Amino acid sequence: MALLRGRGYASVNYPTGMNLGGDPSQALIHATTMGGFVVSLSSVDLGQGLKTIAAQCAAETLGMPMDNVIVDTADTDTGPHCMGTFASRGTHRVGNAVIMAAREAREVMLQVAAEELEVDADDLETDGSGFVRLKGSPETKIHVQDIALAAHFKQGRTISGRGIFLKERSYPVPETGEMDPDSAQAHACTVAEVEVDDETGIVTVLSLHNAYEIGRALNPAMVTQQVEGGAWMGVSHAVFEATEPYYPSSRAHGPVDFCEYLMPGPAETPVQTSVILERPASNGPFGAKGIGEMTANAPIPAVANAIFDACGVRITVMPFTPESILRGLDELRDAEPSA
Amino acid sequence: MAKINEIDTEFFADERSSSFTVIGTPAQRSDALGHVTGKTEFFEDRAFPDLAHVKIHRSVHHHARIDSVDCSEALKVPGVLRVITHHDVPANWYLVLRLIGVEPHDEPVLAEDRVLYVGEPIVAVVADTEAAAIEGASRVKVSYTELPAVLDVEEALSPDAPVIKKDGTNYFVYEGHHARRIRFGDVEEGFAQADHVFEWRYSSAPIEHAPTETTGCIVVPQSGNRLLIHSNTQAAFFTLDNTALILDRPFTDLQVKGGTVGGGFGGKVDVIVEPLACIAATLTNRPVKFVYSREEEMQVSSPRAAERIYIKDGVMADGRIVARKVMLYVDSGAYSRHTPYGTTKAAAHLPGPYTIPNVHADCHCVYTNRTPSSAMRGFGVTIADFAIESQMDRIARALDIDPLELRLRNAYRDGDMKAHRKVASGTALIEVIQRAAALVGHDLPPEYLAMSSSTPREA
Amino acid sequence: MTVKIVNLKLNGVDKAFMARPETTLLLGLREQLGMMGAKRGCAQGACGSCTVLLDGSPVVSCLVPAVTVDGSTVGTVEGLSDGQVLSDVQQAFLDGFATQCGFCTPGMIMSAEALLERNPDPTTEEVQEAISGNVCRCTGYEPIITAILDAAARRRGTTAATTPETDEGPPPTTAYESSEGMRADV
């Protein structure tokens, strides 16, 4: 009886968005009297951080600090349409819509500032700290608060913008499957190291080494959250999860709570080392691709391949239960020529 | 101290130059302060003194005819306000994908004369308290005549299987075809020229999203007959539009508020709780909460579809894959929900991130007598990747080729034509393999280190 | 049905609410007292989202009959901060990007607070044990474990740990402190 170690590899790609029904999202943005910018959306943050990404995209485009940006979502009375949060589309679609809206608002902001400063709007720039200033003459400047007040109470203008991203619907050709269903592809390669207990059949995933290509890391801390949390889910899918343990022959014994539906706990998480590559997508917000879904995928086959490397059992059914490992080991023993 | 993964700027250096102020910085999450102080408001984090609750009486059979439904005992439970049957649902038959023109409307909000899976909702009970609603739901009496059930995707497609769907086939029909097809090149010719042919089978069981917050909503009647829906839907307008169609009410009657969700992973894209909660709120003129119990979330809410995948590959002695044929069976369970869409997504993903000149795929969306599957993180792709990447490992071992070199040899590059006839661009499979190899000290020969996604492959 | 008045000291303040025999502490807190920090994740005692401190010990409040806590002290996530300064655990979760959807966070933080009260210098294994009843579906736990170790170091007034102690694998390639600190919700 032994603990057997093995290493497995997997490389994958993953589409950003899916436009087989048309795939739009919208954003509206307006300045408040004191120079705050409200980004109105109906998009949903599932925890991946869409609100933060929307604020970053707005702040970057406006040239304003993030503190000036308020994201108001998701109220269908006040927020414009969003298709929804799925298909690794949120950052890509909503980010693009916010950038478009913020560009329009920025243009008005600079025009209002130009009138206050009595200069040409084309000669103005933002400094990222809240000021609009004259290029090459940084002392000629005006704070966004004064710009907003002037727009509201003096010039009678709304500093606002509208944005939409739409990838038009693609209809698959029924005979051949020809279609254009996505906007970009992100990539991942995972190397998994496992330990298989040949007495119990238990697989312990020791480590995951990952390389991800994600277009652009808009927020590297949140990228780390997303890829490592997603890879954990992949490991969980690989070795634990099923709502039907006896699929497909029986529907019985389905788990009904977290004592029966197992996932790796805090002490069962593999060590993860990840490196991010950036190949900006031409159509992505600042080049970003969607990565919400992809990161769960490569660990599953990487673990399966590592199990084979460790003990010679080829697992072809998910999840990779101790029972399936033990049955595989038994088959290997039975196949051995008797001594 | 946040852990932040290294960004390796050596790769694609000429494509990624730019200067940003906010983008690319680890800006604090705007929601994190609310999370750590408990101030983040999820849909359920609001109290109404006269809140009513909805619970469901569900099918106990995989497949049965409903002979009668008796709600009289349920109505006698103290606190029970109403029972809701299919007669109370204005447009009972629906399909969430109807918003993008997908038909047929194959699922009833509440069962009429048949149930197709264990857990299918038959009667909704509205009560003053959650306990009374649970008690009421347990007192509903349904008498059934059991019908033969189909639980295996390939058995469901056999000619002698009972047809469980009213539309006449145990599979979704894709523009006249029994499967979503990919036809690219000529696989039979590819197999004929191949040095080796490998064929293996892979499969998976259904998987639960298991968000820590279960699916739910609170519907609050407003002045002017509007309904305000506090929901943890992943798609506010998708939920609003589908709910209005089921209620047969003007879209402007409804307002959805949400946007802060305790995990979704695709499980909160179905429109399941909102229509019944709206009906209950309308019938009782009270705020109504309908939230899944953990047991319902695990056994009744849509799982990630189970899949069965056969892959047959024609491979040359040097590892080049010249033909790949895939037969995919996606277990949709009793109803369509998002699975016909996920099956097409699977088709578009095949044959994986490799350039293979001959590809043939039939991707079947199959109905069986189990909980309907639907969207989940990576649907159509996650299980396919398990199969494809296991296949690659087995081929590498069979031909005694390094597993990463086999992948690099077949990796798709810019300008390659994919099997669904889209020209690849922005590819980076080669680079992630090279970088992962470096991470673990897996030596690659110079010619593999010199490969690049933006360099066209040699003919 | 007997309705009882339950008196308790909630986050240092005397409170009272009416409870039926089947009312749980979780529902009492949420529906009677309006304290929404503790979450209902399963109502089966298996996810830990409803964790609060009962007389200093962590409990899953969905399994505690409210009538049994009469006269007790109860601590919830709302009581950890005065709105100006966060507790060390809260600050460490914030700085460590240890939250994603945030639903498990209040329960996770209360389990961590209880751990650090009884053990100011826990090992990685003790942290893992302390939160083993708290389910997180988003993060993979690693940032949470790191944040709790960091909070322990902060409370002891020593340098914060950057990664959990572990026998496996190299440390992350880059790890540096987020300087953003507290930020108003945008």
Image (cartoon, rainbow, N blue to C red):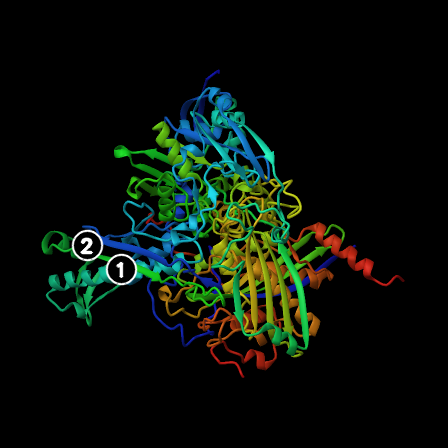
In depth, the one of B111 and B138 nearer the eye is B111
Compared to A180, does B145 lie above or below?
above
Please name the residue that numbered disc 1 is placed on: A102
Compared to A11, does B383 lie above or below?
above
Q: Which of the two labelled residues, at mark 1 and mark 2, occupies the earlier sequence position? A: 1
Quarter of the image for residue B92 reads top left
Say which element carries label 1. Answer: helix
Task: Tell me the kind of residue under disc 1.
Answer: Ala
Residue B241 x, y percent position in the rendering: 35, 46
Please name the residue that numbered disc 2 is placed on: A145
Residue B426 x, y percent position in the rendering: 44, 72
Task: Tell me the kind of residue under disc 2.
Answer: Gln
Compared to B243, does B445 lie above or below?
below
The chain carrying label 2 is: A
Foreground label between 1 and 2:
1
Specify few, some or many for label 1: CA neighbours under 10 Å numbering under 14, 14-19, or 20 or more.
many
In the picture as drawn, the residue positioned furthest to the bottom comes out as B459
Point 23% across, 61% down: residue: A104
Q: In this view, does A338 lie to the left or right of B5?
A: right
Q: Can residue A208 be seen in this view?
A: no
Residue B204 x, y percent position in the rendering: 61, 53
In depth, the one of A224 and B297 nearer the eye is B297
What distance separates the C-alpha of mark 1 from that of mark 2? 17 Å
Specify few, some or many for label 2: CA neighbours under 10 Å numbering under 14, 14-19, or 20 or more.
some
**Discs 1, 2 touching: Cβ within 8 Å:** no
Say which element carries label 2. Answer: helix
Compared to B118, does A231 lie above or below?
below
Q: In this view, does A148 lie to the left or right of C101?
A: left
In depth, the one of A24 and C107 nearer the eye is A24
